[in-house]
Image (cartoon, rainbow, N blue to C red):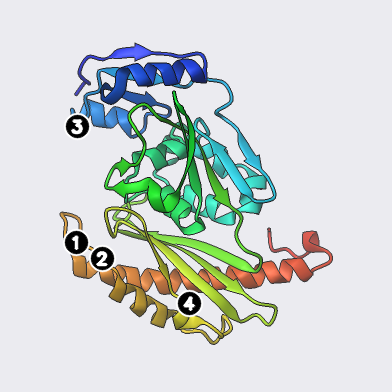
Amino acid sequence: MKPPAFRYHAPASLAEALATLAEAGTRGKVLAGGQSLIPLMNMRLAAPEHIVDINGVPGLAEVTVDAGGVRIGALVRHARLEADDAAAAAVPLLRQGVRLVAHPVIRNRGTTVGSLAHADPSAEMPAVLALLGGSVVAAGASGRRTVPAADFFTGPMESCLRPEELAVSAYFPRQAPGTGSAFVEVARRSGDYALCGVAALVTLDADLRITAARAAYLSMAPTPVVLDLTDAVAGRTPDTADPAAAGRLAAGRLEPEDDIHATAEYRAHLAGVLTARALRAAARDALDRFGAASDPHPADSGSGR
């Protein structure tokens, strides 16, 4: 199928893009990577009258790493982020999550901020942003505002972005010291949307005991769900903790719904199994990072980190 007719705009500056969006209002859509928008238009599930292509807008394709975390511009492709070693070193969960996004051909064109703005509850990057407590910068003709992840996602395929606003960047805070991370999911086929996905963070203290454990879930609710699972594993070492207990705790707190892909019961079961798997992997990752920090010759360790 082909999309319905629309008017194409190619602004050469951010100011021009924002002015065009303000004029178009609810009749306009932003085109960055187009990996979500174009299929929706082709299937006639979206019919914007104005397409605002921001690929010619300068200053939106940068990945910036600072002391606090990683800022990603609106035109940064998933593949560009996946390959950025500085970003992965600052926030390992970024690479762990983005490498699970669809297929390489999609990642080569799709944008991370575009995925956030699309707000699909089955997508990986919204879960990463939510778990890390990140934020999105939205720009409009009247100025800019920074929206915390907890307020950004408002429903399935819905964010708090106003029709005249453009998500110009997203900020992913660094993981706390002593924190390991992991991202696991189950899909019917590689690259498909996950039936359930779990991103996890586990923090160890100097005695290598767990002080915090949190997880974010995709495909389980209209928006990403973040759960604090510390009570199930606190005070134990990665070797003595019972991740399955955390899995049972998570399964009991989540409220998935039946759909054409899986029953609510099956999704809850997956959530429990994947929570245990993700926490176990994140705890191992935290141990590895402690080991790397104490190794005076990390390049000779053979760990690959």
Compare marks 2 and 3 and give the one earlier in the sequence.
Answer: 3
Compare marks 4 and 1 and give the one earlier in the sequence.
Answer: 4
Q: Looking at the image, can residue 56 be seen?
A: no
Q: Position of residue 9 (x, y in %)?
A: 38, 13
Q: Position of residue 119 (x, y in %)?
A: 34, 44
Kind of residue sitting beneath label 4: Thr
Residue at left offset 48%, top offset 37%: 145
Kind of residue sitting beneath label 2: Arg
Residue highlighted by disc 2: 267
In the displayed structure, would residue 41 be above or below residue 281?
A: above
- Marks 2, 3: nearer the viewer: 3
Q: Secondary structure at mark 1?
A: loop
Compare marks 1 and 2 and give the one earlier in the sequence.
Answer: 1
Look at the image and tell me in which quarter the C terminus lies.
Answer: bottom right
Residue highlighted by disc 4: 230
Q: Nearer the viewer, residue 269 or 72?
A: 72
Residue highlighted by disc 1: 257
Q: CA distance from mark 3 to mark 1?
A: 23 Å
Residue highlighted by disc 3: 45
Q: CA distance from mark 4 to mark 3?
A: 41 Å
Q: Secondary structure at mark 4?
A: helix
